[in-house]
Image (cartoon, grey):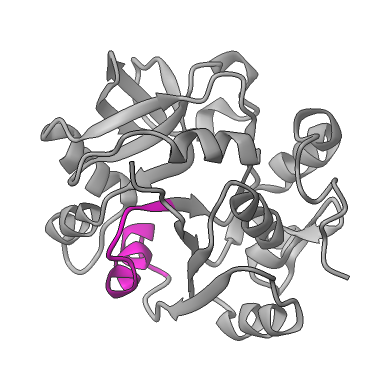
Amino acid sequence: MTTTNECLILAAGHGSRIAALSGASPKPLVPLCGAPILEHIILSARAAGIEKFVIVVGYRAEAIRAWLADHPFEDVSITLVENPDYQKANGVSALAAKEYLRNPFLLLMADHVFEPATARALLRQRLGHDEVILGVDYHIERIFDLQDATKVRLQDTHILEIGKELDHYQALDTGMFLCSPALFDRLAAAKKNGDCSLSDGMRGLAREGKLKGFDIGEGRWQDVDTPEAFAYTEQIFDHDFGASPILEGLVHA
């Protein structure tokens, strides 16, 4: 089985909901437990086996570029791709990276922290040449902000529906995807008036029976896109993310 060691991180958005904490800084650089959120994402993915990163930036792209220049990461390559249309939905940001990812890749959000073991388990899944596998969490009762979470309805491992407004669902979208490059074709097909979301592309895959769910079990993750979610994550971080490289002292000086 081919090992997936490439990763796409979407880090282009304005992050308006967390502006009270970020000020003029881009959301990926907001410190969480002593390190920028983006550093959490990169270090956890690296610990899971990722060696090549493609990061799509937009709002305050120069700040992220400068931070990466001052904080080089060992043993990985990082390519920044700028999306001038970052005000549009996140599917447009994903499409901006199309030419840089020709092999299966891990897709991550710049505002979702996770445990390396969870990403490692997702990377071990067998992926069809035109499939996407989404890490899903069946522990709905432990979600911090259920109203804001993206819901998932499945039949066995096949995802039938995905969206924030679903009335009937069994699991939640963790923001971690194992993708074949076919995702880009589905996103392009879903564009309307030059815009599309990741969920639009995923719905296209679901209609074809090409979108599957991977149960993360007891794995922990957290979306930190509001001040309230940020405060909650800092409160539970030591307990729920004890295996984080940040806590293991791998933060760059």
Question: Which residue lies at the image location 69% right of the left edge and 71% below the top edge?
Answer: 73
Q: Report the span colored magenta.
A: 87-106
What is the quadrant of the C terminus in the image? bottom right
| Left-right relation of 40 to 201 | right
Residue 177, percent from left and from top: 40, 43
Q: Residue furthest front?
A: 1
Who is closer to the viewer here, 107 or 25?
107
Residue 153 versus residue 197 in the image, above or below: above
Residue 169, image x, y percentages: 36, 17
Vertical side of 90 occupied by 58: above or below: below
Find residue 40 and report its horizontal and vertical position in percent: 70, 54
Residue 189 lies, with reference to residue 161, above or below; the image says: below
Which part of the image, by quadrant, shows the N terminus? top left
Splitting the image into 4 quarters, where does residue 17 fall?
A: bottom right
Identify which residue, 1 or 193, lies in the foreground. Answer: 1
Residue pictured at 59% horizontal, 68% vertical: 76
91 with respect to 240 (left or right): left
Q: Is 72 within the magenta? A: no
In terms of depth relative to the viewer, which is nearer, 79 or 49? 49
Residue at x 37% of width, y 76% of height = 85
Q: Residue at x 49, y 17 (%)?
A: 138
Residue 203 falls left or right of residue 177: left
How many numbered discs sit on the rendered protein?
0
Residue 41 position within the rendered picture, expressed as x and y whole percent measured from the top left: 63, 54
Left or right of 234 on screen, residue 114: left
Does 91 appear in magenta? Answer: yes
Q: Is residue 222 visible?
A: no
